[in-house]
Image (cartoon, rainbow, N blue to C red):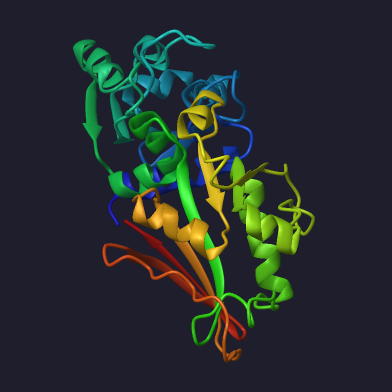
Amino acid sequence: MNIDEKFMRRCIQLAKNGQQNAKPNPMVGAVIVHNGRIIGEGYHVRCGQAHAEVNAFASVKAEDEALLPESTIYVSLEPCSHYGKTPPCADLIIKKGVRRVVVGCIDEFAEVQGRGIKKIREAGIEVEVGVLEEECKALNRRFFTFHREKRPYIILKWAQTANGFIDDHHKPVKISTDFTKMLSHKLRAEEDAILVGRITDEREHPQLNVREWCGPDPKRLVIDRTHPLNIDSLYAQNIQSLIVEGGAETLRTFLIQGLWDEIRVETNTTLTVTDGTRAPIVPANAVVVSSKTFGSNSIVIFRR
């Protein structure tokens, strides 16, 4: 790991602190470094409040202000160049007169898209882009998908038996453990909305809340053939992420239409049934990005 990657990792670590409250804005972390020593750092805490760069500069001690012209500021996402709820961070960076700016990834939001970097370079400040780029993009994949595709980031999720069923003779069966159930509720607390089909709603009466975790409940959605999902409506409501928990036909409909960005499959490796509803088949273009085992259960995460 080189020195730029080291401090960009710290930016990513800081950015994650804004996971709940920064929405609908992206998570961003910033670190100011002089001769290998961090003299300031910050992250975007809450939507409508100061951005990461502002908080990083504000944290610099008075006796270190004179070091800024020889310092580098690392930012996980391109500094903004437009007036929103706060002034442009690109202007602040120029005003502070740092020697160098290192950016994790370009901001795909239409109001930014390279303009912040262009403005800083035109001010004569050295800018490097693309340090830990894929990790920085992954950090805000929901934000990027929302603005690029004009729809939420869609997570398909199901639990299955060792032999690939999601129920037992078409009746609910306990597949998750208490611990993996808690992880599911943690996921719900991190996403904006959750969806099931009418049959699942009528048969299982799922609460779809976060009673096993701390955080906000996702918006609850139930669809059927007469009440289909309106993707444009979700975009208009500023819903950036959606969990689809089934049942099987609902999940397959999303798969057939290619409406998915991530798939999470939990498998109880010790449980088998003789008949029931078959779990969906993970598409061939899905790539495993994480595989973890929790006792008898495994959780595999796929992305495109």
Q: Position of residue 132 (x, y in %)?
A: 30, 47
Which is nearer the eye, 29 or 184? 184
Left or right position of 45 against 155: right
Identify the residue shown where x is 74% and y is 51%: 209
Q: Position of residue 77 (x, y in %)?
A: 38, 32
Instruction: Decide: is 169 above or below 100.
Output: below
Instruction: Decide: is 202 above or below 36.
Output: below
Q: Name the residue at the front extreme.
A: 226
Residue 143 appears in the rendering: yes
Q: Position of residue 267 (x, y in %)?
A: 54, 78
In which quadrant of the rendered image does the N terminus lie?
bottom left
Identify the residue shown where x is 34% and y is 12%: 94
Identify the residue shown where x is 33% and y is 31%: 148
Instruction: Decide: is 104 above or below 175.
Output: above
Q: Position of residue 288 (x, y in %)?
A: 36, 67
Instruction: Decide: is 1 above or below 58.
Output: below
Which is nearer the eye, 19 or 271? 271
Q: Name the residue at the right extreme.
A: 211
Left or right position of 171 against 159: right
Q: Quarter of the image holding residue 36?
A: top left
Identify the residue shown where x is 47% and y is 19%: 65
